[in-house]
Image: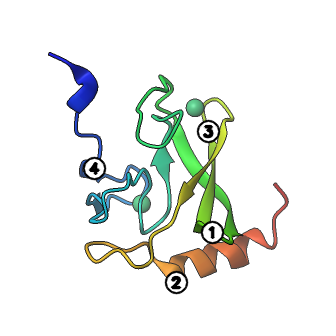
């Protein structure tokens, strides 16, 4: 069996808030919860599931790119890896919560990372 065709854009349950996270409709790989933006450290590049860590990726900030739009910045609780993942506020199935992002940004503005 080749792993080349493994479906990686799959539904999963968020370990932080228990949201059932559905795959993105647009074919890109979601690796975070649209409600609380937590994720698991499974990827080296988005969707490749090549990291053997499995630690909880906690959102530590957000960025806005001119081309890519909004990105969430994660830090792994287990190994300290910092990574980014694109947000999808326009996903027709289960968009990322813009309101929750705003709440987190307000919270982060009082903390130094
Ligand atoms: Zn969540
Ligand atoms: Zn990790």
CA gap between label 3 and label 1 equals: 29 Å
- Residue at image coords 40%, 79%: 90
List x then y, in percent, for residue 109: 79, 73
Q: Quadrant of ligand 1?
A: bottom left
Whether pointer 3 and pointer 4 mark residues with C-beta atoms closer than 8 Å, the reply is no
The CA distance from mark 3 to mark 4 is 19 Å
Q: Which residue is mark 3?
A: 77
Quadrant including the N terminus: top left
* Front residue (pair 39, 30): 30
The residue under label 4 is 12
Residue, x 52% and y 77% (percent of image)?
100
Q: Earlier in the sequence, mark 3 or mark 4?
A: 4
> Which residue is identified by label 1?
67
Name the one closer to the observer, 3 or 102: 3
Q: Quadrant of the image for the C terminus?
A: bottom right
* N-term mark: 4 or 2: 4
Q: As drawn, is 87 to the left or to the right of 49?
A: right
Gap in angstroms between the C-alphas marked 4 and 2: 22 Å
């Amino acid at each position: 069996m080749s792993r080349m065709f493994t479906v990686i854009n799959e539904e999963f349950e968020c370990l932080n808030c228990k949201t059932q996270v559905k795959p993105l409709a647009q074919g890109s790989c979601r690796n975070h919860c649209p409600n609380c933006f937590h994720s698991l450290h499974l990827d080296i590049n988005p969707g490749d599931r090549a990291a053997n860590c499995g630690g909880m990726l906690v959102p530590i900030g957000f960025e806005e790119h001119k081309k890519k739009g909004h990105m969430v910045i994660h830090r792994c609780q287990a190994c300290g890896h910092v990574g980014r993942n694109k947000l999808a506020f326009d996903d027709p199935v289960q968009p990322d919560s813009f309101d929750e992002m705003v709440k987190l940004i307000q919270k982060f503005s009082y903390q130094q990372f």
